[in-house]
Amino acid sequence: MIPSILPTYSRAPMSFVKGEGSWLIEADGRRFLDLGAGIAVNALGHAHPKLVAALTEQAQAVWHTSNLYHIPAQQKLADMLVEKTFADTVFFTNSGTEACELAVKMARKYWFEKGQTDRTEIIAFEGSFHGRSAAGIAAAGSEKMTKGFGPLLPGFTHLPLGDHDALQAAISDKTAAIIVEPVLGEGGIIPLPDACLKGLRDLCDSHGILMILDEVQCGVGRTGKLFAHEWAGVTPDIMMVAKGIGGGFPLGCVLATEDAASGMTAGTHGSTYGGNPLGCAIGCAVLEEVGSDAFLAEVNRKAGLLRQKLEGLVAAHPDVFELVRGSGLMMGIKCKKPNIDVVNAGYAAGVMTVPAADNVIRLLPALNIPDEDIAEAVTRLNSAAESLG
Ligand SMILES: *Cc1c(COP(=O)(O)O)cnc(C)c1O
């Protein structure tokens, strides 16, 4: 008999009744150090007082009005994002995959309005993840996500990452945009070298192609800059954001330059919930915290501490782990043992990590994880590794 919840997930046998900072607590009181943070969502940990206050205050004022009217919290968050980024304009969604839908629509509409109506093709990269909607699975293109769901949204070409010749060959006068994650998340925590992102930007510029960056996982302070592309000193034309921006409340957005967004006039896109007062009030609180230089400096310091400890962990367990890679507090450990076994051994030791492709476990802790929790997490990962060794 089919379960009452559509069985699309394979869940670990845990459930939590409370969250405190970097900790999750089961009904029997068992405590887990949460290095998954709801897959890079709980950017400020669980039950952060400022986020609880922002949510409570907005909840007591007004929850939802629809986008038929002005929404002050949405205006405030848009203004903050425009001030802090390359973007001139923002559209709010509830999730990352909805951001992908708009990014694709925006890129196509751009060329349509320029009179280049068959300039609709989008180049994407193998191993990427852009969400589970029709545009998201078509963009990522992997058989794992698309099999059985055809016919797929047409117009996507998939290239291996780092294959410059394939990229040059794939570009034509029909190429509307290139979409890429600056740090692949689900794909196994693979940071694109700065030179690679710069090269992509140059290529886009020389062919007039729009650059779409998917910062749904690597954005909002995760890598130690507010957005990961800042490390490379380039800016996209369109950017997808979600996960961390809501700190645990469903919120996403698409950021764009005025030019890239020029086709999106009144009536061309919309969302009933997108940019609702609750989500945007929390988004403002998240951005006020994460967007400060002092906070980002702390992320970088903590990232250095975690990385150093993880290098030691990997060196101590060469039979379990192979190497550490990542950027900021978006770390991956490539395993020698099956990554699922390592994740499960972590659960037994009271520490939560998230599996990713390429036999990697992901460490995506709260960006404000205390130093002592970093130390405790690595102690627990060490116990997990010992149990597998
Ligand atoms: C999680 C993720 C998405 C999809 O976000 P949802 O909120 O699950 O729809 C898209 N792109 C990247 C890079 C992601 O990590």
Image: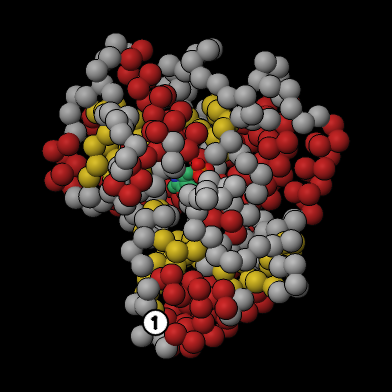
Q: Residue drawn 33% across and 64% down?
A: 358
Q: Is residue 111 left or right of residue 87?
A: left
Q: Is residue 276 left or right of residue 323?
A: right
Does the rendering let one see residue 352? yes
Does the rendering let one see residue 181? no
Q: Quadrant of residue 327?
A: bottom left
Q: Residue drawn 68% across and 35% down?
A: 280
Q: In the rendered view, tell whether residue 335 sits above or below residue 38.
A: below
Q: Residue drawn 27% across and 14% down?
A: 117
Q: Specify how the rendered protein is coloured.
A: secondary structure
Q: Count of labels shown?
A: 1
Is the residue marked by circle 1 packed among few (<14), some (14-19), or many (20+) residues within 10 Å? many
* Residue corresponding to mark 1: 320
Residue placed farthest to the right in the image? 60
Q: Secondary structure at mark 1?
A: loop
Q: In the rendered view, tell whether residue 13 sits above or below residue 151.
A: below
Q: Position of residue 114 (x, y in %)?
A: 32, 13
Q: Quadrant of the C terminus?
A: bottom left
Q: Nearer the viewer, residue 231 or 238?
A: 238
Q: Position of residue 14 (x, y in %)?
A: 62, 66
- Identified by mark 1, the residue type is Val
Q: Nearer the viewer, residue 6 or 232?
A: 6
Residue placed farthest to the front in the image? 1
Q: Quadrant of residue 62?
A: top right
Q: Position of residue 194 (x, y in %)?
A: 35, 53
Q: Residue drawn 75% across and 48% down?
A: 51
Q: Quadrant of residue 207?
A: top left
Q: Position of residue 204 (x, y in %)?
A: 28, 34
